[in-house]
Image (cartoon, coloured by chain):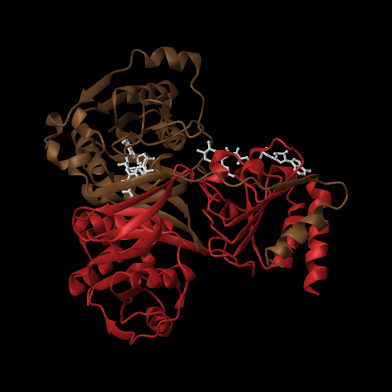
Chain colours: A red, B brown
Amino acid sequence: MAEVLVYVDHVDGAVRKPTLELLTLARRLGEPVAVALGAGAEATAATLAEHGAVKVLTADAPEFADYLVVPKVDALQAAYDAVSPVAVLVPSSAEGKEIAARLAVRVESGIITDAIDLEAGDEGPVATQSVFAAAFTTKSRISKGTPVITVKPNSAPVEAAPAAGAVEALAVSFSAQATGTKVTARTPRESTGRPELTEAAIVVSGGRGVNGAENFAIIEALADSLGAAVGASRAAVDAGWYPHSNQVGQTGKSVSPQLYIASGISGAIQHRAGMQTSKTIVAVNKDAEAPIFDLVDYGVVGDLFEVVPQLTEEVKARKG
Amino acid sequence: MSLRIVVCVKYVPDATGDRHFAEDLTVDRDDVDGLLSELDEYAVEQALQIKEAADGEAEITVLTVGPEDAKDALRKALSMGADKAVHVEDDDLHGTDVMGTSLVLAKAVEKTGYDLVIAGMASTDGTMGVLPAILAERLGVPQVTLLSEVSVADGVVKGRRDGDTASEQLEASLPAVVSVTDQSGEARYPSFKGIMAAKKKPVESLDLDDLDIDAEEVGLEGAWTKVDSAAERPARTAGTIVKDEGEGGKQLAEFLAGQKFI
Ligand SMILES: Cc1cc2nc3c(=O)[nH]c(=O)nc-3n(C[C@H](O)[C@H](O)[C@H](O)COP(=O)(O)OP(=O)(O)OC[C@H]3O[C@@H](n4cnc5c(N)ncnc54)[C@H](O)[C@@H]3O)c2cc1C
Ligand SMILES: Cc1cc2nc3c(=O)[nH]c(=O)nc-3n(C[C@H](O)[C@H](O)[C@H](O)COP(=O)(O)OP(=O)(O)OC[C@H]3O[C@@H](n4cnc5c(N)ncnc54)[C@H](O)[C@@H]3O)c2cc1C
């Protein structure tokens, strides 16, 4: 059967959810062969096997951590040469997209980024994209070379589908470009203990209406009552009330949770670009004319300082 | 020696306009006003700051691949303070995908001559966020991308990249390709003087022949990707909107419970 390369996004061996979603999509096209690189690569094998990887190609070398992007492209290309896949799937993280794009140039293939769904078609995989701030849905395919496609988080269910997942060491020889960009220091992001923004089933976001860093405690309390991730608009981030890593929107994270709750956010096009594909949208805003209300399934016109704490209390009471 | 900086800027349909597709499934550029992609203003700004830090010992060329109107984007960048512009324009470019666009940009950058290429983090229409990495691959130079802070000194570019799981300090020797995020620093507004000066700055036009590119390598026909359909997302069914009269939070909880979120 045809093999599909799946690039594994993991942190020290812990596979991130978008990769497991990719395995679900990969199985629609063929047999998934996973490529895991860097520290802890081999430790990913059990999880990947459980979700359908027939093979796990692993490589570790200091280059993966010490230099930007290119060493990983070299390794993915080595896997590509070893497997001759019918498609290459990569999670749509900032780095994932860059790795995929450079591979595509090298193997002379077209690339599609930020797919939200994938089906097998007569002329290769058909990718669905959500474009122009989610106002349009397009279907595209790759007409030259082996399809290289990056897929957004939350695009497919994670399904168990046990397979062999045999670990094989991947031989990588690094290109002249591999050591071009040095990583001279790295500061890991501190974990908040809350779910990862792009992977969360529920996201609770605050905007300029939250009016101060200290008031984000109100947003966090609601998030914690629901087991949700916390997001913020750019206005709130630019004001220094919340970290940039939590920004939702065109230049922040794009999220597609089951439930998105926006408080004190007007709903500018650039914000909508990052959350419009959420399944259920709820907003609290004191301005009945705020554009966010055009998107909502349920909206409350009111002061978030009244409505949000009351909601949090009610959620806690109902959850007992 | 003076630092040669090329800034890649894209002319895009205004995101606040009614963007849609033409019959051939390319972006309809006639119905919506175009402008310099806002995220590329940050690239122009960083180029200007690098030039200032080098006591003016740098020359900034802005480069675009786009239709006739794309000159507007170049004028804006020139009025911000760039020195000259290059416009690659050719009827055969209509419908070019990222592989074709990057080929054209790579050839144009090489023809212009460069020590540093600066791009935006992503366009505001295609929003792929991959072009700078592809450009680096094609040019065979280091990519130092998605920087929220950037500086150049003694032939070395340094910057900070804030990623998903960590923030990294990066460093590479020139020549290199850089891309900057909207965290890199607010872009300046063109001054009246800048706008007047821009009118006199040179804009060079190049076509595919000038770059030794065959028409078959680009355009809709030469694209390595194909869009089969584009459908407007169905309007969301109007939601329930209530006015808070003291029970708004409880009513919202009731809705969430009904949807099984609680
Ligand atoms: C190139 C570009 C990229 C961008 N990228 C992003 C992005 O990724 N993400 C993003 O979010 N934005 C982005 N923006 C900015 C965007 O255009 C808006 O400026 C921003 O989203 C506004 O944030 P906001 O809704 O929090 O603030 P505002 O628009 O100021 O809205 C605040 C809202 O809070 C309401 N409010 C105030 N007080 C209360 C209260 N007590 N109770 C209830 N409601 C209250 C107000 O009625 C108002 O509707 C981008 C802009 C550009 C040009
Ligand atoms: C909605 C939509 C979806 C698309 N999806 C795909 C796809 O999946 N695959 C594909 O191959 N093509 C796709 N395209 C076409 C693609 O967007 C263009 O070929 C494009 O110019 C390159 O990609 P980008 O604009 O997304 O650039 P990005 O990679 O997002 O751009 C990053 C930076 O590159 C520079 N840059 C980009 N284009 C130019 C230019 N023309 N002139 C000067 N500098 C430039 C700018 O500095 C910009 O900030 C899509 C286009 C649209 C409108």
Q: Residue at x 38, y 78 (%)?
A: A41
Q: Quadrant of the N terminus of chain A?
A: bottom left
Of residues B143 and A45, the one nearer the viewer is A45
Of residues B43 and B225, the one nearer the viewer is B225
Quarter of image, res B254? bottom right
Ligand 2 is found in the corner quadrant, namely top left
Of residues A12 and B26, the one nearer the viewer is B26
Q: State whether residue A112 is above or below residue A157.
A: above
Can you give x and y, in whole percent of width and height, for residue A185 in the image?
Answer: 46, 61
Residue B224 placement, left or right of A230: left
Q: Quadrant of the C terminus of chain A?
A: bottom right
Residue A278 placement, left or right of A33: right
Of residues B66 and A31, the one nearer the viewer is A31
Q: State whether residue A142 is above or below residue B41.
A: below
Can you give x and y, in whole percent of width and height, for residue B204 in the image?
Answer: 24, 22
Residue B24 placement, left or right of A259: left
Can you give x and y, in whole percent of width and height, for residue A226 in the image?
Answer: 70, 66
Quarter of image, res A229? bottom right
Q: In the rendered image, is residue A294 in sight? A: yes
